[in-house]
Amino acid sequence: MATSAKTAAAFKPKASDVRLAKADQTTEAARAINEANARAHAAKTEKLRALRLEREAAEAAEKEAAPKKKTAKKAV
């Protein structure tokens, strides 16, 4: 079944529709990039937080294990 010229013209996308579709594609690409950056940032933050907590725990354990220094009494 052949389509007539009128039918083909009626369903042909308008220039404004094509621009909107292009803008939507650009928006989706930008959002995907931003979401990927946000996920990477959150993962990095979690990793650094875990490392910091581990370091603080090690420092606290080291501080407890170290013998306390006795202060010298001053002769008056």
Image: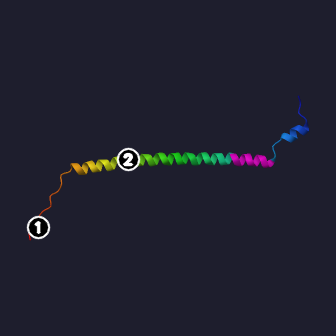
Q: Which one is earlier in the sequence, the residue at label 1 or at label 2?
A: 2
Residue interval drawn in magenta: 15-24
Q: CA distance from mark 1 to mark 2?
A: 43 Å
Lateral position of residue 10 relative to residue 47, left or right: right
Q: Residue furthest top?
A: 1
Q: Residue furthest bottom?
A: 76
Q: Is residue 34 above or below residue 1?
A: below
Name the residue beneath numbered marker 1: 74
Quarter-of-image position of residue 75: bottom left
Residue 4 at x, y = what percent? Answer: 91, 35
- Count of numbered labels shown in the rendering: 2
Residue 76 at x, y = what percent? Answer: 9, 71
Q: Is residue 70 magenta?
A: no
Per the picture, the main secondary structure of the magenta-coloured stretch is helix
Lateral position of residue 31 relative to residue 14, left or right: left
Amino acid type at circle 2 is Leu
> Residue placed at 46% from the left, 47% from the top?
44
Q: Secondary structure at mark 1?
A: loop
Lateral position of residue 23 relative to residue 42, left or right: right
Quadrant location of the N terminus? top right
Amino acid type at circle 1 is Lys
Name the residue beneath numbered marker 2: 51
Lateral position of residue 42 relative to residue 22, left or right: left
Disc 1 crowd rating (10 Å Cα; few below 14, some 14-19, many 20+) is few
Q: Secondary structure at mark 2?
A: helix
Frontmost residue, 26 versus 68: 68
> Residue placed at 74% from the left, 48% from the top?
20
Residue 30 at x, y = what percent? Answer: 62, 48
Residue 13 at x, y = what percent? Answer: 81, 43
Q: How is the image coloured?
A: rainbow
Mark 1 and mark 2 residues within 8 Å of each other at the beta carbon = no
Disc 2 crowd rating (10 Å Cα; few below 14, some 14-19, many 20+) is few
